Image: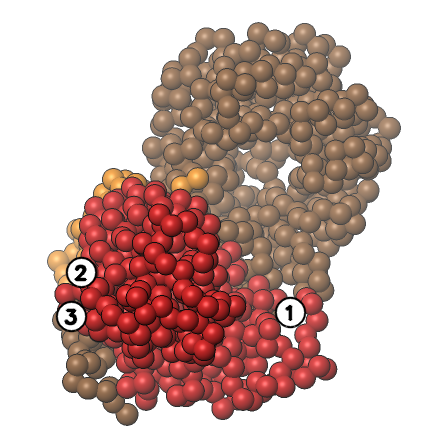
């Protein structure tokens, strides 16, 4: 067996350039379990290798052309004299990952009113009040908010109405939709509206309006009737019934694709992962977001409490994810949204704009909030925190401040600069850095410090545990891997 | 400066530990970074001796002796890992700058 | 297999012409002023005298009896029966002195390909068209004459070599001619991509603004030294990758072409991962069977692997590419060797003039859907060719790979 003639050179000839040894490309690593490490390159591609191989790589003990060598070379962890194009490819991939940053603010939350017919204990902001003047957004504020919105350089602009119960001030929803649409005739952005509502005030007239402007509806569904009504008290104790009726109407008039639902996890939810998921399945949803317990409702500033809560929530999440994977194996395509988000970060060349998993923090970049009174916040959580008396993340007020003033304010730039994961202690060399983010509001709420000591951080513990869990599933459980890969969207 | 210890690991009666990391092998940064990671379970005092860094490690809660051994093991391994991270970071510092410079200078293909 | 070249030509009268490019016409009523540029191809139905005024006359040997070859016309030729496929509107290069006829373009074919040079800067182990280091610049001049003669409605024209980019500005001239004379024709160039590492060339090619231009570029491994070995050129991998990036920077469509053989099949899944993570923006990926032409025959021991033996790697590769939503096709494969999960990706891709089926295929009920063989496959093909019978017909919804 040989090549036909001396005109051809054999493989050894082309391997000569490997003999001068290889060089490392930048990468981070983290322990996966007792024997394995996850290594991630600068563009967020990961590999699972043994501890021995990890130390061999760094100590330049790899055998050129061996399978491990080729895998590390192919995935851009090392390069050799034969090829340097890895550098250009990495630069391109890094840039692609960062591209969503350049699009800047896409999501704009308009708080049309703080009034609400529900009195959910986890909500810090709603008011049970008839006083419209005190808690409703005025046209003057709305105009300023629309101006502010269109100053975003983003081509995709999403306006989401929040509350209180946003529909209790439907007049304002209508006003903003009509004005923004008018404005967009010259702006020509990709403009999309979402109404976040508990659906109880929903009328046919409102639905007609939604149909006309192609508005999406996002509602709250916490789980089965008993849990939902317990979490979300309202006079008549019929929140669940109202949501069911409302959802049916939305599906009939706007179509099922226009309806989304979010759940809030409470202490009572933690033992009910399966029933909650079943509720979503029965309601015809194709995904659920198993959201973490919010620290704001509990006003916790003790680190150990944070850790304890996280532990309990992780149990809930894993139980839920296991069940969802089972459902998929049985033939139902059903996604856990947070998992899908992380998988997309791990397995695609693209970045995301999900606010909690951004570096620097997604504050004001992923989303910005216009409160009913004109106050501007960097995120919905900042608004919650402000209602609890901590106004640190209030960026300004629409009536007094300009776009530039707000976007270049210390209240925003300070945390943004401080929360680049590349520079935070424990984050800067973490193997999961590419997939994670920084949540300054969370760390401020739990530790009184926007950076926080990650050794105590529930945020860190949560994400590390989930990421380890997902990588183990991808590596060790072929059936789960098939399911998880089917959630990745390119 | 306290009297120099010579045994690499000493268990004190009050439950605290003294661990020595030879300077010829470990960097101060690696010792510090590893300690920081364990601040949820121990408090640390790091002293510099002539030939070693002396880490006084005091668990913040009572830990059974077996768990303490495991803690020490993973702490020592973490110092090794941190040391490796440092070496990788310093070896790849220049190429990393090169990649980032290129990432922010050329037109991209995948945006949008 | 169609014979696109022939030298078995007999001149019935006199000829003093240099080689020339001309279109064939079967129309004896063709307007007189235009005849001087065309060759009259006597159709089967023709009888009697030849129409006057054409530049030359071709008569298929088997039709000779019915034609009255006018002795006073120069340039009347008898062409062999294997040229029966020639039709009105085809464009040929004809060298009366050396009696060489070469078909450049067939009006009714979907597979017209222009060979623009035989020179190449790679020396691939399995090259089907071994490069020649000769001055063949006349080819460009010929093509610039031939292109305006092609049917404006032509759907696609291929450009092959050799390595077309070696022509530099001459390639740009050919592309311009295609753009100007065939403005709605898709153009597909087969290139190794290396010269596009020079971004100026990528910019120039993009600047021609051809209708639907795609450049098919081979990539044989995710590992530089393996790719370089296959193409027998050190440094080729880096240049090819840079070339692909440069073309995409200028908005030119790129197709990645992977020939599967003994040196490439093992890392096919890793190559797929590499494409998905690094070159997700390419427009098409073709995973192709080996053609038994040129160097392949000589290097057969280093290249041949029965397609049945690389199905696991092919399934994994396709799985990755499809999962990443890449547009992927399998070329040059026989259905009976393909894992059924791959059938939806199989494409009949072999050019009509060299597409064949083996004797084993005679009773097969799926021949219509099958890619078949290159005519060269007679040299060597799989031992596992199995005709399908009626009962084995797959359902309409062929199974998809699990994603």
Q: Find the distance from the CA under tag 3 to the CA under tag 1.
A: 48 Å
Of labels 2 and 1, earlier in sequence is 2
Q: Colour of chain B?
A: orange
> Which residue is labeled 3 in the image?
C133
Q: Is residue A286 visible to us here?
A: yes
A107 displayed left or right of C255: right
**Residue at image location 42% in from the left, 83% down from the top:** C377
> Could you say where residue A338 lies in the image, as x and y percent from the top left?
57, 48
User: Which of the chains is red?
Assistant: C
Chain name for mark 1: C
Q: Find the distance from the CA under tag 3 to the CA under tag 2.
A: 12 Å
Seen in the picture, residue A384 relative to C347 is either above or below; the reply is above
Seen in the picture, residue A41 relative to A439 is either above or below; the reply is below
Of labels 3 and 1, earlier in sequence is 3
> Which residue is labeled 1 in the image?
C399
Label 2 sits on a secondary structure element that is loop
Query: Any mark on residue A427, and which?
Result: none
> Could you say where residue C256 lies in the image, as x and y percent from the top left?
38, 61
Q: Colour of chain A?
A: brown
> Which residue is labeled 2 in the image?
C137
Chain name for mark 2: C
B89 or A370: nearer the viewer: A370
Q: Are marks 3 and 1 in contact (CB under 8 Å)?
A: no
Q: Is residue C189 visible to us here?
A: no
Label 3 sits on a secondary structure element that is loop
**Residue at image location 56% in from the left, 77% down from the top:** C335
> Could you say where residue A366 lies in the image, as x and y percent from the top left?
48, 33
**3 or 1: mark nearer the eye:** 3
> Could you say where residue C197 lies in the image, as x and y percent from the top left?
22, 54
Crowd rating for badge 2 (residues with CA inside 10 Å; few <14, some 14–19, many 20+): few
Q: Are marks 3 and 2 on the same chain?
A: yes
Quadrant occupied by the N terminus of chain A:
bottom left
């Amino acid at each position: 067996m040989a090549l036909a003639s001396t005109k051809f050179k054999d493989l050894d000839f082309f391997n000569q350039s490997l003999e001068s040894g290889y060089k490392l490309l930048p990468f981070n690593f983290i322990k996966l379990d007792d024997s394995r490490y996850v290594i991630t390159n600068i563009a967020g591609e990961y590999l699972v290798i043994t501890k021995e191989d990890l130390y061999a790589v760094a100590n330049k003990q790899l055998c050129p052309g061996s399978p491990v060598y080729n895998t590390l070379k192919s995935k851009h962890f090392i390069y050799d004299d034969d090829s340097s194009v890895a550098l250009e490819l990495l630069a391109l991939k890094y840039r692609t990952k960062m591209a969503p940053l350049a699009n800047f603010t896409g999501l704009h939350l308009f708080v049309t009113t703080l009034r609400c017919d529900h009195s959910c204990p986890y909500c810090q902001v709603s008011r049970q009040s008839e006083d419209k003047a005190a808690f409703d957004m005025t046209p003057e504020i709305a105009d300023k908010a629309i101006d502010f919105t269109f100053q975003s350089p983003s081509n995709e602009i999403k306006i989401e109405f929040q509350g209180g119960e946003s529909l209790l001030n439907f007049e304002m929803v209508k006003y903003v939709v009509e004005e923004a649409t008018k404005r967009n005739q010259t702006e020509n952005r990709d403009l999309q509206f979402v109404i976040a509502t508990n659906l109880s005030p929903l009328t046919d007239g409102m639905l007609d309006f939604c149909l006309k402007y192609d508005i999406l509806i996002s509602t709250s569904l916490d789980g089965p009737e008993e849990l939902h009504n317990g979490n979300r008290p309202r006079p008549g104790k019929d929140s669940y019934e109202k949501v069911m009726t409302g959802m049916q109407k939305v599906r009939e008039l706007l179509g099922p694709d226009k309806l989304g639902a979010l759940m809030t996890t409470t202490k009572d939810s933690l033992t009910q992962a399966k029933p909650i998921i079943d509720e979503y399945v029965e309601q015809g949803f194709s995904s659920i977001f198993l959201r973490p317990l919010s620290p704001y409702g509990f006003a916790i500033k003790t680190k150990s409490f944070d850790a304890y809560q996280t532990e309990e929530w992780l149990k809930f999440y894993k139980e839920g994810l296991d069940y969802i994977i089972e459902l998929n194996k049985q033939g139902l395509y059903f996604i856990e949204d947070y998992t899908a988000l992380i998988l997309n970060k791990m397995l695609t060349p693209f970045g995301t704009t999900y606010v909690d998993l951004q570096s620097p923090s997604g504050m004001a970049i992923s989303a910005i909030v216009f409160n009913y009174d004109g106050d501007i916040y960097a995120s919905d959580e900042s608004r919650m925190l402000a209602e609890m008396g901590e106004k640190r993340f209030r960026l300004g007020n629409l009536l007094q401040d300009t776009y530039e003033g707000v976007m270049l304010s210390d209240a925003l730039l300070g945390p943004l600069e401080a929360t680049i994961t590349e520079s935070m202690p424990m984050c800067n060399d973490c193997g999961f850095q590419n997939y994670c983010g920084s949540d300054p509001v969370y760390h401020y709420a739990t530790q009184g410090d926007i950076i926080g000591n990650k050794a105590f951080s529930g945020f860190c513990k949560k994400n590390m545990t989930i990421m380890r869990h997902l990588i183990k599933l991808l590596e060790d459980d072929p059936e789960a891997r098939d399911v998880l890969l089917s959630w990745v969207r390119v | 400066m306290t009297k120099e210890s010579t045994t690499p690991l000493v268990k004190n009666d009050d439950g605290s530990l003294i661990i020595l990391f030879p300077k010829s092998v470990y960097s101060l940064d690696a010792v510090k970074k590893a300690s920081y990671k364990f601040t949820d379970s121990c408090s640390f005092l790091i002293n510099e001796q002539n030939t070693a860094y002396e880490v006084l490690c005091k668990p913040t809660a009572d830990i059974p002796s077996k768990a303490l051994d495991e803690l020490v093991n993973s702490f020592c391994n973490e110092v090794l890992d941190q040391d490796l991270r440092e070496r990788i970071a310093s070896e790849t510092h220049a190429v990393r700058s090169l990649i980032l410079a290129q990432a922010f200078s050329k037109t991209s293909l995948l945006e949008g | 297999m169609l014979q696109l070249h022939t030298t078995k030509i007999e001149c019935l009268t006199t000829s003093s012409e240099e080689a020339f490019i001309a279109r064939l016409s079967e129309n004896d009523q063709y307007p007189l002023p235009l005849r001087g540029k065309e060759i009259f191809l006597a159709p089967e139905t023709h009888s009697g005298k030849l129409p006057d005024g054409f530049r030359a006359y071709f008569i298929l040997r088997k039709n000779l009896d019915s034609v009255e070859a006018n002795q006073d016309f120069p340039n009347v030729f008898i062409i062999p029966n294997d040229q029966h496929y020639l039709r009105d509107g085809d464009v040929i290069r004809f060298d009366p002195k050396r009696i060489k006829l070469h078909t450049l373009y067939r009006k009714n074919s979907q597979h017209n390909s222009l060979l623009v040079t035989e020179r190449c800067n790679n020396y691939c182990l399995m090259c089907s068209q071994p490069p020649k280091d000769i001055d063949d610049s006349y080819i460009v001049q010929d093509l610039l004459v031939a292109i305006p003669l092609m049917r404006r409605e032509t759907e696609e024209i291929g450009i092959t070599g050799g390595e077309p980019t070696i022509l530099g500005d001459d390639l740009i001239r050919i592309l311009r001619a295609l753009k100007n004379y065939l403005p709605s024709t898709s153009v597909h160039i087969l290139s190794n991509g290396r010269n596009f590492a020079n971004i100026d060339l990528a910019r120039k090619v993009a600047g021609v603004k051809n209708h639907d231009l795609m450049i098919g570029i081979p990539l044989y491994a995710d590992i530089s030294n393996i790719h370089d070995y296959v193409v027998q050129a050190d440094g080729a991998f880096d240049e090819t990758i840079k070339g692909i990036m440069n073309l995409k920077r200028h908005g030119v469509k790129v197709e990645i072409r992977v020939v599967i053989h003994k040196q490439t099949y093992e890392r096919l899944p890793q190559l797929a991962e590499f494409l998905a993570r690094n070159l997700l923006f390419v427009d098409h990926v073709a995973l192709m069977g080996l053609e038994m032409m040129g160097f392949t025959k000589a290097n057969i021991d280093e290249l041949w692997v029965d397609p049945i033996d690389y199905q696991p790697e092919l399934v994994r590769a396709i799985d990755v590419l499809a999962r990443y939503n890449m547009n992927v096709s399998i070329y040059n494969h026989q259905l009976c060797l393909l894992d059924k999960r791959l059938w939806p990706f199989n494409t009949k891709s072999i050019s009509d003039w060299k597409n064949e089926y083996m004797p084993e295929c005679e009773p097969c009920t799926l021949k219509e859907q099958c890619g078949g063989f290159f005519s060269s496959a007679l040299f060597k093909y799989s031992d596992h060719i199995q005709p399908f019978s009626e009962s084995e017909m797959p359902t309409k919804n062929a199974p998809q790979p699990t994603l």
